[in-house]
Image: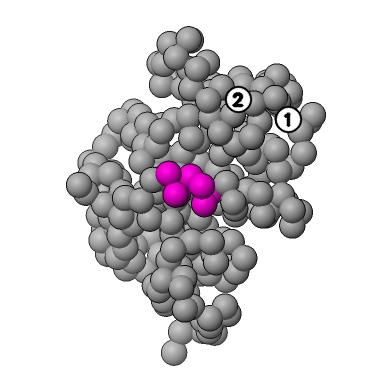
Amino acid sequence: MPAVVELVDITKVYGSGENTVRAVDGVTLRIERGEFVAVMGASGSGKSTLMNIIGALDAATSGTYRLDGVDIGELDDDALSLVRNRRIGFIFQSFNLIPRMSALANVELPLMYRGVSRSARRSKALQALASVGLGDRTHHQPNQLSGGQQQRVAVARALAMEPALMLADEPTGNLDSRSTADVLDLLQRVHAGGGTIAVITHEEEVAARAQRVITLRDGRIAADEPTFGRRAGSVDWGARP
């Protein structure tokens, strides 16, 4: 089967002439099915731009990106939206829940956009919320939930889509230490169940839960190593020689 994420010589350039910025500079990367990968980097390293490309939220200037075997560069806007909806489950730092909708309705919403029948999406959403420990909070609105519970709703929303890739952008950035541990435990359970996860983070605690850590510097991959045996803080964030 194809890799879930296959990037070949991906470049993203902003500006022109003297103002040219190569936010991502020739990145080649594979994320295999069932992997749990963390992407780290200092501010300005290119990790957010890379996340947007992997999430099909932004297009690369050059290079090839295949998501679950689909060449993203060959898709028009409608096809790209469809692939993004069906193959990627997003988890954001700010949760991105709709305030006046219940946890259940928030999880159901992307399934509705996909065209899933009412009964089927209700079943999937209830199952996903139960799997993240929120079976008793289905009718609570976001303001009735803690930050950690809101992020678990976001994880349930991604899980209900049964995506090829779960893409998490700083998923614990707005959480206290207890909620952070709970969400990371949950992501590890998703991975243990066969899920493919890519987490964008600057936190060593988060990266330590992954199997593999990819470190970006100046838009390039500075290190790509398994978590086991990796020394925290081992990457030099200094300017490229």
Q: In the figure, residue 91 lies in which quadrant?
A: top right
Asked whether 190 falls inside the magenta stretch, the response is yes
Secondary structure, mark 1, is helix
Whether residue 208 can be seen here: yes
Disc assigned to residue 142: 1
Mark 2, residue position: 106
Q: How did the renderer colour the structure?
A: one colour
**142 with respect to 66 (left or right):** right
**In the image, residue 128 above or below residue 227:** above
Give the farthest residue toward the left: 1
Q: Give percent across and percent down for residue 218.
A: 46, 74
Sort mark 2 into few (<14), some (14-19) or many (20+) by Cα contacts within 10 Å: many
Relative depth, front residue between 77 and 115: 115
Three-letter amino acid code of the residue under disc 1: Pro
Residue 27 appears at what percent x and percent y? 33, 66
In x, y percent, where is residue 145? 76, 33
For label 1, count other residues whose C-alpha is less than 10 Å away and answer few (under 14), some (14-19) or many (20+).
many
Q: Earlier in the sequence, mark 1 or mark 2?
A: 2
Real-space Cα separation, disc 1 to disc 2, in angstroms: 9 Å
Would you say residue 55 is visible in this rendering?
A: no
**Is residue 45 found inside the magenta-colored segment of the image?**
no
187 or 95: nearer the viewer: 187
Number of numbered discs overlaid on the protein picture: 2
Residue type at mark 2: give it: Asn
Q: Quadrant of the C terminus?
A: bottom left
Highlighted magenta segment, given as a residue range:
187-193
Q: Is residue 24 left or right of residue 147?
A: left
| Magenta highlight: main SS | helix
